[in-house]
């Protein structure tokens, strides 16, 4: 189980995301930049204990109506091979931050991180247990998965990632040789996917304190 340190990160996550979000195709906030607050999320454990995996929700109030963005993040103690951020179009590296306990951390857009996507595929199939966003060794039963496929399959490779206004589509190859597509929902809404092999549903808070639930990720063949 991952241990959540009660310490600082400099720069903080919201500061890193405020600089990164405006260049994303799903960003709908002010041209002057977002005004972000944390509004939900959960974590997944890396069985190897090397990568921190967080599915964060941030709410932007810079535009007209508040917008809740789903931002999967991965935290590493060294650069991710093949995703060093030198190609700005790749969108892999969000930034680096100094962690008060662990030292320098490389913060990635987790849709480009094979470890994070492997665990998300496991969650979509009910093979991974979601963890509380801010508490160590604490499952989060409010995060639910619904899988209608024939049986669980593990990821062999992350083959492609495409960002669009609707979200991020990730194609993976399974150990059985099949191709599956994971759609990561970026702008959260209270609706449910139709005809999907699997989905992950979780909650987030509105600025007025209302609780919302909707799909964070959807699995399709």
Image (spheres, rainbow, N blue to C red):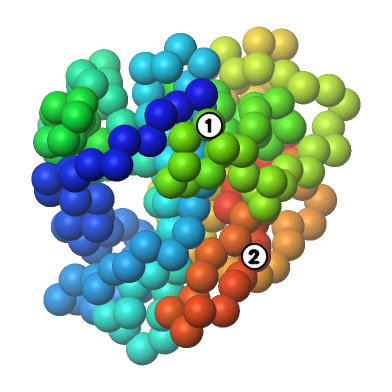
> Residue 100 is drawn in which quadrant?
top left
Alpha carbon separation for disc pair 1 and 2: 23 Å
Image vertical order of residue 24 relative to residue 180, above or below:
below
Task: Sort mark 1 into few (<14), some (14-19) or many (20+) by Cα contacts within 10 Å.
Answer: few
Q: Exactly how many numbered labels are in the figure?
A: 2
The numbered dot on residue 149 is none
Compared to residue 142, the image places residue 126 above or below, namely above
Residue at the image point whose x is 37% and y is 17% from the top: 50
Q: Estimate the x, y position of residue 28 in percent, counting from the top left.
A: 35, 73
Q: At 73% from the left edge and 62% from the top edge, which residue is drawn?
A: 192
Give the mark nearest the N terminus, 1 or 2: 1
SS for callout 2:
strand
Q: Is residue 61 above or below residue 14?
A: below
Q: Secondary structure at mark 1?
A: loop
Residue 137's label in the rendered image is 1
Can residue 85 be spotted in the picture?
A: no
- Who is closer to the viewer here, 212 or 100? 100
- What residue lies at 19% left-to-right and 44% top-to-bottom? 8
Q: Residue at x 37, y 62 (%)?
A: 38
For label 2, the residue is 213
Query: Residue 4, located in which quarter of the rendered image?
Result: top left
- Using residue 161 as the reference point, say whether residue 83 is left or right of it: left
């Amino acid at each position: 189980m991952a241990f959540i340190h009660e310490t600082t990160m400099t720069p903080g996550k919201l500061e890193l995301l405020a600089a990164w979000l405006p260049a994303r195709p799903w960003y709908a906030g002010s041209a002057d930049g977002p005004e972000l607050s944390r509004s939900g999320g959960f974590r997944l454990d890396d069985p190897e204990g090397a990568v921190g995996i967080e599915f964060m929700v941030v709410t932007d109030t810079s535009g007209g109506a508040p917008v809740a963005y789903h931002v999967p993040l991965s935290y590493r103690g060294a650069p991710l091979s093949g995703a060093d951020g030198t190609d700005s179009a790749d969108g892999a590296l969000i930034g680096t931050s100094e962690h008060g306990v662990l030292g320098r951390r490389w913060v990635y857009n987790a849709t480009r991180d094979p470890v994070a996507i492997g665990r998300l595929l496991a969650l979509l199939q009910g093979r991974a247990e979601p963890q509380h966003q801010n508490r160590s060794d604490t499952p989060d039963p409010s995060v639910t998965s619904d899988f209608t496929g024939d049986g669980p399959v593990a990821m062999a490779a992350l083959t492609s990632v495409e960002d669009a206004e609707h979200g991020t589509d990730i194609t993976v190859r399974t150990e059985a040789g099949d191709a599956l597509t994971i759609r990561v929902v970026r702008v959260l809404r209270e609706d449910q996917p139709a005809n999907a092999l699997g989905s992950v549903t979780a909650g987030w808070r509105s600025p007025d304190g209302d609780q919302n639930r909707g799909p964070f990720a959807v699995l399709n063949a």
